[in-house]
Amino acid sequence: MSVLDPSSGTPLLRIRGLEKAYGQVTVLRGVDLDVAKGEVVTVIGPSGGGKTTLLRCVNFLETYDKGSIRIDGEEVGYQDGPRRAMRSERDLARMRAETGMVFQMFNLFPHLTAAENVMLGLVKVRRKPKAEARAIAEHWLRRVGLAEKLDRLPSELSGGQQQRVGIARAVAMDPKILLLDEITSALDPELVGEVLDVVLQLASEGMTMLVVTHEIGFARDVSNRVVFMADGLIAAAGPPRELFGGAIEVERLRAFLSRFGARV
Amino acid sequence: MGYHLNFNLIWRHFDKLWGGLVLSLELALVSIAIGIAIGLTLAVIHVSGGRIVRALIGAYVEFIRNVPLILLVYLVFYGLPTAVDISYDATTSFVATLSLYAGAYLVEVFRSGLDAVPRGLIDAGKAIGLTPWQRLVHVRLPTMLRITLPALSNTFISLFKDTSVASVIAVPELTYGAQWINFNTFRIAEVYLVVTSMYLATGYAILLALRALERRFVIGR
Ligand SMILES: Nc1ncnc2c1ncn2[C@@H]1O[C@H](COP(=O)(O)OP(=O)(O)OP(=O)(O)O)[C@@H](O)[C@H]1O
Ligand SMILES: [Mg+2]
């Protein structure tokens, strides 16, 4: 099976030989991964396998040591050329604005209302006039079912509502790719559905996504491709039916999936 | 034994006390404003600067915090003009001293506040493409201010009370007004009763105002 999506020549996101260590601990040991435009790729795997680190490298919230990450052909974090020089802060900010990120702990700006959380990037980064930014924020907050909560502070919202603001904040920037890191794992079980529904909706509209999740059922439903990551490496990858159907013989994957037995 | 409280003489000179209180508040307000400017600037420099600037800021903070305020007041008012050729009146001298004093305490408050801004919020600011300066202005400082409001309230009240030290260089604030009336009327108990009540009432009013601000702004959770 090819890692490249057959529908397009160069993938939107192209990761090659990605290595990352925190001090003595090597967390990523040579990850290769492509995500084509419009594709939803889900990353599953045991705790500590490097899933969060992988996502954070794609958004350059973490530096990486070796290998390459390219979005639309542009190297993330480092200048093109033989010398591995970091991009300027201005350049990093510009590139980060092209990738949306939704966090496990929501990370909403606590002093700003739901609408203001969404507007901040639109006004300061996209340089939109306030009124236009407000209209875009209202549009996206309505899309995630929060039309009634525009002017509420994060502290006045439930976890599920906060996370939907987090999604609206990311997609309102019109990113090339959306990165989701276990966006439901801090939520009470009864609030998980409302958040995943929003993601499913975005996926059906063609949003390119790289999703880390422990919700195996959701991974099966939303993904074009599932990647199983363990010990800093991609140990298995394939369409959800193959990966979850037992067609791929990888011992660690089997052991991992058996914990979810009933739900797959 | 008959010491009878008699407030008549106090009321006759009450304008001294009232004027003193107004000046005390003005001294506090101006020093706090300048202190905030010093504190914020140095805190921001401290969290983003190199070792040498950090050490310099640390030296300033430690110097101020380990020397009694009254001594700083003497140093600036009597010492400095002898050492270098400048002159200023007592009020200006005291405002300068209290501002530097406030600045040192506020650097510490703001610095620990900046450190307490959750990493995730800074990441969220990065993720939407804010530059470091935009993250500072739109994410770190507003969050820090809300985190530090309770500590700020305490510092402000202390600084208001510290204006009484200005009496040692004859700045006519409230405590100096009390001493003046003492000297001229010898109604010592009465004066200090009245002045204590005035400090208490004003300090408490400031506290209530700041608490109201905290309820409005401190991040609920
Ligand atoms: N800032 C850090 N400093 C040092 N070590 C880190 C840091 N962040 C992560 N690690 C380590 O890197 C490894 C991979 O962590 P990572 O968070 O990427 O795993 P994960 O697959 O997302 O796990 P989980 O499913 O628990 O979220 C872990 O061993 C972790 O302890
Ligand atoms: Mg993780």
Image: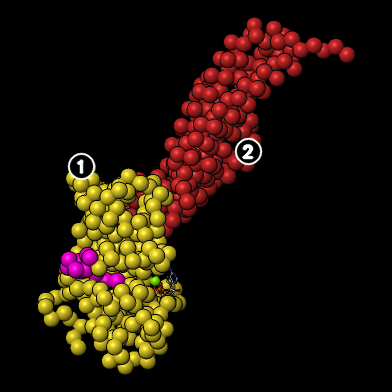
Chain colours: A yellow, B red
Q: Alpha-carbon neighbours of circle 1 within 10 Å: few (<14), some, or many (≥20)?
A: few
Name the foreground residue: A163 vs A83: A163
Q: Mark 2 — residue?
A: B67
Q: Say what amino acid the circle numbered 2 marks.
A: Val
Residue at screen point 17% across, 81% down: A4
Query: In terms of image quarters, where does ligand 2 lie?
Result: bottom left
Res A67 quadrant in image: bottom left
Q: Which residues are magenta?
A: A201-211
Above or below B122: residue A8: below
Residue at screen point 21% across, 61% down: A175
Tell me: is circle 2 under 8 Å from ligand 1: no
> Whole-percent x and y of residue A211?
29, 71
Quadrant of the frame with the C terminus of chain A: bottom left
Q: Mark 1 — residue?
A: A131
Tell me: is circle 1 under 8 Å from ligand 2: no
Residue at screen point 67% across, 10% down: B10
| Marks 1, 2: nearer the viewer | 1
Q: Alpha-carbon neighbours of circle 2 within 10 Å: few (<14), some, or many (≥20)?
A: few
One can see residue A29 in this view: no
Quadrant of the frame with the N terminus of chain A: bottom left
Name the foreground residue: A14 vs A227: A227
> Whole-percent x and y of residue B23?
54, 20
Residue A125 is left or right of residue A254, and the answer is left
Secondary structure, mark 2, is loop
